[in-house]
Amino acid sequence: MQLSWPGGPLRGTAQLPASKSEANRALILQALAGGGTLSNLSDANDTQLMMRLLAAAPGTVELSAEDAGTVMRFLTAYLAVTNWRGRLTGTARMQERPIKVLVDALRQAGASINYLNNDGYPPLEIAGFTVAAETTEPIELSVRGDISSQYISALLMVGPRLPGGLRLTLTGHIGSRPYINMTVALMQRFGADYSAEGDVLTVRPGAYQPTDYTIESDWSAASYWYSFVALAPAGSEITLPGLRRESLQGDQAIAGMMKQFGVETTFLSDGVHLRQIPLAPQTEIQTLDFTDCPDLAQTVAVVAAALARPVDMTGLESLRIKETDRIAALQTELAKFGGDLRDLGEGRFRAESSGFAVNNQSVATYHDHRMAMAFAPLAMRGLLAIESPTVVRKSYPQFWKELAKSGFAVSEAE
Ligand SMILES: O=C(O)C1=C[C@@H](OP(=O)(O)O)[C@@H](O)[C@H](O)C1
Ligand SMILES: C=C(OP(=O)(O)O)C(=O)O
């Protein structure tokens, strides 16, 4: 895929996908509740896949979560507690993404789950659920929160299905906490009886209620349009419908992060308007923490390098086990442009550049939708090729079409 910008300011409106994070939670809750109408469901492959697998599960003994982490983790818990028996697998990369924390917790709750290849990793055999004798006491589990919040979300969502409910004690450094908050908020929308004392989370037993819910547009997808505006010619602006000021998505943090890169956010009645503003001289290197919003790291690292406005980044630990080792991928691909994500030690990385230039480099995408979308805005600065462009279908299938609509020349690479 070759991208080029014809010149002049970026203007207009871009359509975003719905949040796959919200959608995949709502689908699990809808299934557990036995009903409810979900609107604005995402066309993201991760969401379409979740829908397909939830529908197929009753008559199938082999399901693949492909490369979708929330599908793999949420379905492992859902299928276990609903007594599904069969094999749940995924892509080669998914078979390198750890799931031991979740399997250990589900086993403690009564699930029979076996590893079919490497211990601690998919594929899994899910072989039933033994419910302890009638009890009114919650199952007490302790779960570390420094690997993936998805294990915690998965356990919380099935908690009301356990005879005495669930009491989850989170341990260690909790990453991606806004996703846990999103899970709880949606569970409560579907009628869950939840309370928390610090990091001790209690879900009481009971039936979810069929509930109607409209999925919000995706703030993670919006982050790439922030980059487009930041790197575009002077006078650029764009409107993004469907985003809410009161959002369940932690990636709304992009609005604050991008101010220093010259993008101002105005909230509208439906969505946001982004406007390019003059860049103030950089007087110091700011530190941005991505513990709560790891999916924004690639977006920000690329913009900081492209603008030669170095920024220190912390909270990147979980990037190593996502669709690819995102730290290594960023370092390799940024180097092609004169950029770097330099390891300063103790979990601190500096996004920086020296002589940054875009002149027809080819960006590898490592089966990672966010590598393709985070680097695409560099086309504002010169001719660019993106390898395996269909990788964006995981979260934003219309991404290239929206770029073409906004004025980019988008063509299959020769
Ligand atoms: O719960 C979710 O919807 C997600 C949680 C995050 O993963 P981790 O909790 O593993 O950081 C995030 O990276 C992912 O894109 C979606
Ligand atoms: C890591 C991501 O998703 P998941 O963990 O659900 O595969 C992502 O969308 O960046």
Image: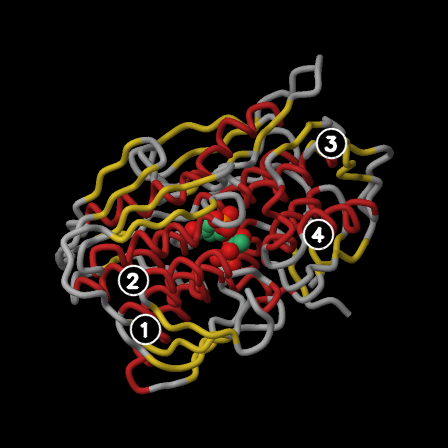
**Which numbered disc, 4 or 2, marks the residue closer to the eye?**
2
Residue 168 as seen in the image, left or right of residue 323: left
Which label is found at residue 54? 1
Residue 277: % across, % down: 57, 23
Residue 135: % across, % down: 15, 58
Q: Earlier in the sequence, mark 2 or mark 3?
A: 2
- SS category of the residue bearing label 1: helix
- SS category of the residue bearing label 2: helix
Alpha carbons under labels 4 and 2: distance apart: 38 Å
Residue 55 as seen in the image, left or right of residue 394: left
Residue that appears at 66% across and 56% down: 409
Mark 2 lies on residue: 27
Alpha carbons under labels 1 and 4: distance apart: 40 Å
Quadrant the C terminus occupies: bottom right
Q: Amino acid at mark 2?
A: Leu
Q: Earlier in the sequence, mark 4 or mark 2?
A: 4
Q: Earlier in the sequence, mark 1 or mark 3?
A: 1
Whether residue 382 is visible: yes
Mark 3 lies on residue: 350
Alpha carbons under labels 2 and 3: distance apart: 38 Å
Q: Amino acid at mark 4?
A: Ser
